Image (tube, rainbow, N blue to C red):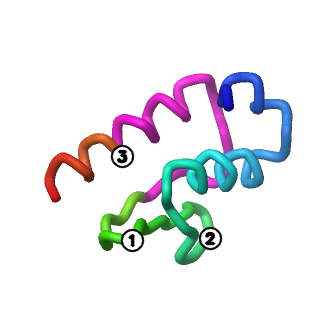
Amino acid sequence: MNPYSMCMAHPITTIKKYMKVRGFYLVRQSKHLIWRDEFGNQIVTPSTTGDNRTFKNIDRSIKRVRQKS
């Protein structure tokens, strides 16, 4: 799944699909989306895909959180 080709879909749906593939589930949402994985790692993402760097930033956050645990 290429996240950059998915940018034309609804922003929240796009991020939900992207995070599901990476093993995260949605805990709550308001202005930001709060995600957790089965190990209890938590990530906060924006609720819209504002630019092309959104998915790179999410990948960086996932990598950083998983290195700590």
Q: Is residue 59 left or right of residue 64?
A: right
Q: Nearer the viewer, residue 67 or 8?
A: 67
Q: Residue at x 49, y 57 (%)?
A: 23
N-terminal-most mark, 3 or 2: 2
Residue carrying label 2:
30
Asked if the residue at tag 2 contacts the one at tag 3, i.e. Cβ–Cβ closer than 8 Å, the answer is: no
Q: Which residues are magenta?
A: 44-61
Q: Is residue 48 left or right of residue 56?
A: right
Picture quarter with the N terminus:
top right
Asked if the residue at tag 1 contacts the one at tag 2, i.e. Cβ–Cβ closer than 8 Å, the answer is: no
Q: Residue at x 61, y 23 (%)?
A: 52
Residue carrying label 1:
38
Residue carrying label 3:
62
| SS for callout 3 | helix
- In the rendered image, residue 16 lying in the magenta stretch gets the answer no
The CA distance from mark 2 to mark 1 is 22 Å
Residue 64 is drawn in which quadrant?
top left
Q: Nearer the viewer, mark 3 or mark 1?
A: 1
Q: Residue at x 77, y 53 (%)?
A: 13
Check disc 3 and give the amino acid type: Ile
| SS for callout 2 | loop
N-terminal-most mark, 3 or 1: 1
